[in-house]
Amino acid sequence: MDFAPRLPYDRLCAEIAAQADLLRTTAEGADLARDVPTCPGWNVAQLLRHLGGGLRWAEEIVRTRADGPPDDTHFRQVAADPDPGLGRWVAEGGRALATTLRTAGPDARVWSFVSGGTRFWARRFAHETLIHRADATLALGADFTVEPDVALDALDEWMTLGTLPHVLEAHPEQRELLGAGRTIHLHATDAGPGAEWLVDLTGDTIAWRPTHEKAAVAVRGPLVDLLLLVYGRRPLGRGTEVFGDRDLLDFWLARTSFA
């Protein structure tokens, strides 16, 4: 089942630029040679090169109305030297992608991993940039914060991407998650109504819905903690409570980590 994004297209475009600029601020004057624990094998400079290259890759797709993916080697294999201009370079990439997406409009047809064209890319890179900002922020020992409506949509998008039908084809090991009675409920305790998700593993594929339902295991905690938890960026913290089958929760988190 498809659920509409909580954020409109223009806001998603704006968030790409905003999150990239926040990352620039975080990176300015920081030790870019520091390791990023949530992206094993990378330092902050490599993370910035990856994100900045990804932003430019998506901008090319939208600008050229590509019908297939350009080469992505340049942001998969990245140098580790800590160039102090990398934060500014990422911010420039964010502004360029946001501008190109606005010019194209929400209904332009371009290649994407799933249906959606420019709508897909606006949402994907708003949250890609957000999560990699979290990676850099946490690596540098700073506090990570995000507007609640952005975090809610980021969690929705994570759920949607993780329950696409072809995910089980690309990652057959996730079929091990499926089984009778296997349901997981997430509840953000600080975000008001509409901040609950039910992951249903009882059928032939992984499914989710935004609802309050009894489940085999429930996780309650602050919205940012839940977002970083499902992305594999933060373990269960002191402010997060688990009720029910903790083994099922751990198994699900291990099988659905998102790099």
Image (tube, rainbow, N blue to C red):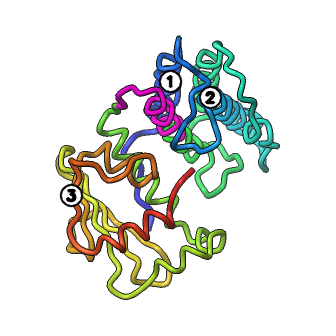
Tell me the SS state at disc 1. helix
Q: Nearer the viewer, residue 95 or 11?
A: 95
Residue that appears at 23% across and 52% down: 240
Residue 125's place in the image compared with 175, above or below, is: above
Q: Is residue 36 left or right of residue 142?
A: right
Q: Position of residue 109 (x, y in %)?
A: 67, 47
Q: Quadrant of the N terminus?
A: bottom left
Tell me the SS state at disc 3. strand
Which residue matches tag 1?
Answer: 23
In the rendered structure, which amino acid carries the disc numbered 2?
Leu
Q: Nearer the viewer, residue 232 or 157?
A: 232
Q: Image quadrant of residue 174?
A: bottom right
Residue 32's place in the image compared with 166, above or below, is: above
Q: Position of residue 141 (x, y in %)?
A: 41, 27
Q: Nearer the viewer, residue 86 or 2?
A: 86
In the rendered structure, which amino acid carries the disc numbered 3?
Glu
Residue that appears at 23% across and 63% down: 242
Which residue matches tag 2?
Answer: 48
Q: Is residue 110 left or right of residue 208?
A: right
Q: Image quadrant of residue 180?
A: bottom left
Which residue matches tag 3?
Answer: 241
Q: Give the dominant element type of the magenta stretch: helix, strand or loop.
A: helix
Q: From this viewpoint, is residue 211 visible?
A: yes
